[in-house]
Image (cartoon, rainbow, N blue to C red):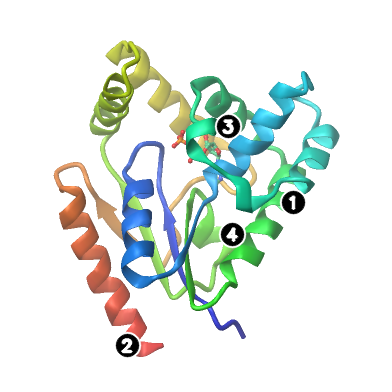
């Protein structure tokens, strides 16, 4: 029995789940963990130390040392780190180590919001609220492109689109914890929805679940 109310949010790259998760956590006063950052932190530690990205034992050891408290998207945002993260995320030993840390975080009172790829299916299968946030690949690539341009960097839309598709294939095609909606997840397609409309829709589902709790 846990004293924490858990909100599980999954979805593909650039679907808007990060922004949505932060809004929800702030609104309900819950702790938020972007689990993508845990995979990115392992990738960065390996890259910084000049260690290989294809040695599961080395990657597992690094995963066991990751501190959730210090995770910061601004230092983990680099494209190269994201690419490396999606490679080490296929390793079962890495996932085992990070999922254990994520579950510990999920149990914090009074409630938590975890976002990622496998929260509703693997990390917190008993969460009372599960959202699967998605949008068409074209819309997601456009958002990612605008984000990069907005940050002052150069980008090529076709390359960003190809990258979104490649990331989807890797996330949905891996054997261990592939990206897919949990059977009891609520689907939220944000292709034609503002972030505010998505937030309102999510709050209705969460309020209803909180009443039952
Ligand atoms: O850059 P993007 O938003 O696509 O990804 P992210 O959320 O920062 O996560 C980086 C990588 O970690 C992704 O490509 C996923 O493959 C992986 N990941 C995962 O396997 N499971 C999670 N719960 C979260 C992220």
Which residue is depicted at the point 38% across and 18% down? 162
In terms of depth relative to the viewer, which is nearer, 47 or 204? Answer: 47
Which type of secondary structure does the marked residue at label 2 adopt? Answer: helix
| 196 to the left or right of 88 | left
Q: Is residue 62 visible to us here?
A: yes
Closer to the camera: disc 2 or disc 4? 2
Disc 3 designates what residue?
A: 86
In terms of depth relative to the viewer, which is nearer, 92 or 73? Answer: 73
Disc 4 designates what residue?
A: 122
Task: State which tag comes first along the sequence, 2 or 4.
Answer: 4
Which residue is depicted at the point 21% across and 56% down? 198
Task: State which tag comes first along the sequence, 3 or 1.
Answer: 3
Task: State which tag comes first along the sequence, 4 or 3.
Answer: 3
Coordinates of residue 78 in the picture (x, y in percent): 50, 24
Disc 1 designates what residue?
A: 97
Which type of secondary structure does the marked residue at label 4 adopt? Answer: helix
- Please determine whether, in this image, residue 119 is positioned above or below residue 145: below
Cα–Cα gap, marks 3 and 1: 16 Å
Coordinates of residue 151 in the picture (x, y in percent): 32, 23
Q: Is mark 3 within 8 Å of ligand 1?
A: yes
Disc 2 designates what residue?
A: 211
How many tags in the picture?
A: 4
Coordinates of residue 137 in the picture (x, y in percent): 30, 31
Q: Is residue 172 visible to us here?
A: no
| 203 to the left or right of 35 | left
Mark 4 Cα-neighbour bin, 10 Å: few <14, some 14–19, many ≥20? some
Task: State which tag comes first along the sequence, 2 or 1.
Answer: 1
Cα–Cα gap, marks 2 and 1: 34 Å
Cα–Cα gap, marks 4 and 3: 17 Å
């Amino acid at each position: 029995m846990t004293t924490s109310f858990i909100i599980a949010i999954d979805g593909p790259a650039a679907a808007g789940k990060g922004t949505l998760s932060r809004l929800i956590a702030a609104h309900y006063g819950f702790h938020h963990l972007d689990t993508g950052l845990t995979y990115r932190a392992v990738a960065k530690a390996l890259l910084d130390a000049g260690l290989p990205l294809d040695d599961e034992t080395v990657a597992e050891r690094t995963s066991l040392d990751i501190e959730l408290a210090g995770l910061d998207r601004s230092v983990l945002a680099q494209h190269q780190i994201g690419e490396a993260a999606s490679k080490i995320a296929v390793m079962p030993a890495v996932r085992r180590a990070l999922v254990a840390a994520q579950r510990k975080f999920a149990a914090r009172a009074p409630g938590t919001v975890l976002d990622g790829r496998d929260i509703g299916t693997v990390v917190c299968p008993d969460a009372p609220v599960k959202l699967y946030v998605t949008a068409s690949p074209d819309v997601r690539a456009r958002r990612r492109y605008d984000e990069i341009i907005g940050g002052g960097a150069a980008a090529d839309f076709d390359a960003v689109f190809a990258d979104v598709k490649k990331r989807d294939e890797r996330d949905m095609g891996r054997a261990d914890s592939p990206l897919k909606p949990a059977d009891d997840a609520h689907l939220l397609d944000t292709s034609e929805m503002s972030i505010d409309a998505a937030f309102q829709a999510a709050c209705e589902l969460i309020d209803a679940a909180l009443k039952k709790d």
